[in-house]
Image (cartoon, rainbow, N blue to C red):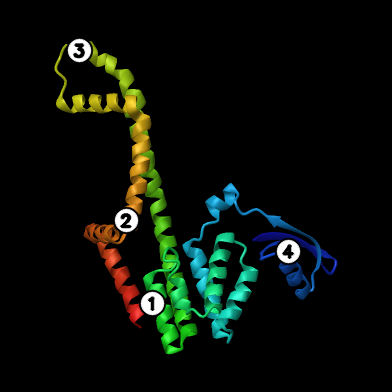
């Protein structure tokens, strides 16, 4: 649960949020940190803001891996690492994952087997590398290399997003303008063609048919596009869908070559 506390530290009032099991746990933490508690209140984690922006992202996994690697390399145990992380994490969704991993490890499960419960956050490669670290006794070294690899991926994703954001906005704007023109503007011009006693070209007839259909069923079109995009996204996340999407991606000119080189670099680092 998420709590917000106000406490005195010397002559200053400190206001922060913390994840804890109960108010007593928060008070115990404040006393151990030489803080005098003034007020401790429970913060609801079911707000719209948390539902929209409280999801675990790739950056959260990268930061979590780096923190674990540093603490393990310093000589701490996994249990100690998770106890420290639970005191620092403020995002409710991430705290639940860390708390679940902590309970599994304290219950006797291995770190890699605990990670398998969250395949949406930890990839098969991530879990396999952690498993190899456990088997070889070099989990701290593996996590250090893994965090470096993840940070490289994050940097590459950031550059890719920065390079694509302008063309994506332009394409979306063009599609939006085309949709508005065909749906709302072209139908008002159709009355001009009715006065012509000539046979219109086939392309113009197709445009008129599309415009008539769009003007009558544009809410249905928007809903169909939105629903189709969700279905395609869910299908891509399946094993068969991901295979077909990646196969198609490798055949795209220029992009396919970049993906091949990037994958080769990742594979080489992993083997190393």
Residue that badge 2 annotates:
236
Q: Nearer the viewer, mark 1 or mark 4?
A: 4
Mark 1 residue element: helix
Residue farthest right in this picture: 11
Residue that badge 4 annotates:
23
Quote the CA–CA distance across marks 4 and 3: 80 Å
Residue that badge 1 annotates:
128
Report which quarter residue 81 is drawn in: bottom right
Quote the CA–CA distance across marks 1 and 3: 71 Å
Mark 3 residue element: loop
Q: Earlier in the sequence, mark 2 or mark 4?
A: 4
Mark 2 residue element: helix
Image side of residue 46 versus residue 270, left or right = right
Q: Residues at badges 1 and 3 in contact (C-beta under 8 Å)?
A: no
Q: Nearer the viewer, mark 3 or mark 2?
A: 2
Q: Earlier in the sequence, mark 4 or mark 3?
A: 4
Residue 172's spot in the image, x, y percent?
37, 42
Q: Nearer the viewer, residue 130 or 113?
A: 113
Image side of residue 239 versus residue 128, left or right = left
Image side of residue 208 versus residue 155, left or right = left
Q: Residue at x 46, y 70 (%)?
A: 151
Q: Quadrant of the C terminus?
A: bottom left
Q: Residue at x 27, y 14 (%)?
A: 192
Compared with 231, 94 (above or below) is below
Residue 196: image tag: 3
């Amino acid at each position: 649960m998420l709590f917000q506390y106000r406490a005195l530290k010397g002559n200053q009032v400190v206001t922060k949020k913390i994840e804890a099991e109960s108010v007593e746990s928060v008070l115990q933490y404040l006393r151990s940190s030489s803080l005098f508690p003034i007020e401790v209140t429970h913060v609801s984690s079911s707000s719209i803001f948390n539902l929209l922006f409280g999801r675990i992202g790739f950056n959260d996994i990268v930061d979590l891996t780096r923190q674990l690697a540093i603490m393990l390399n310093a000589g701490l145990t996994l249990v100690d690492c998770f106890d420290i992380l639970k005191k620092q994490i403020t995002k409710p969704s991430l705290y639940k994952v860390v708390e679940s991993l902590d309970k599994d490890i304290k219950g006797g499960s291995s770190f890699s087997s605990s990670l398998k419960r969250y395949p949406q956050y930890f990839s098969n490669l991530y879990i396999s590398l952690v498993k190899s670290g456990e088997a070889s006794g070099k989990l701290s070294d593996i996590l250090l290399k893994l965090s470096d690899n993840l940070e490289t991926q994050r940097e590459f994703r950031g550059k890719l997003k920065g390079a694509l954001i302008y063309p994506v906005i332009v394409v979306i704007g063009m599609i939006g303008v085309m949709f508005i023109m065909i749906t709302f503007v072209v139908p008002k011009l159709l009355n001009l063609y009715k006065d012509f006693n000539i046979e219109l070209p086939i392309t113009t007839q197709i445009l008129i048919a599309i415009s008539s259909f769009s003007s009558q069923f544009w809410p249905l079109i928007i809903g169909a596009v939105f629903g189709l995009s969700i279905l395609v996204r869910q299908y891509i996340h399946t094993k068969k869908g991901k295979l077909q999407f990646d196969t198609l991606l490798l055949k795209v000119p220029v992009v396919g070559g970049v993906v091949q080189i990037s994958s080769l670099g990742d594979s080489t680092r992993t083997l190393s």
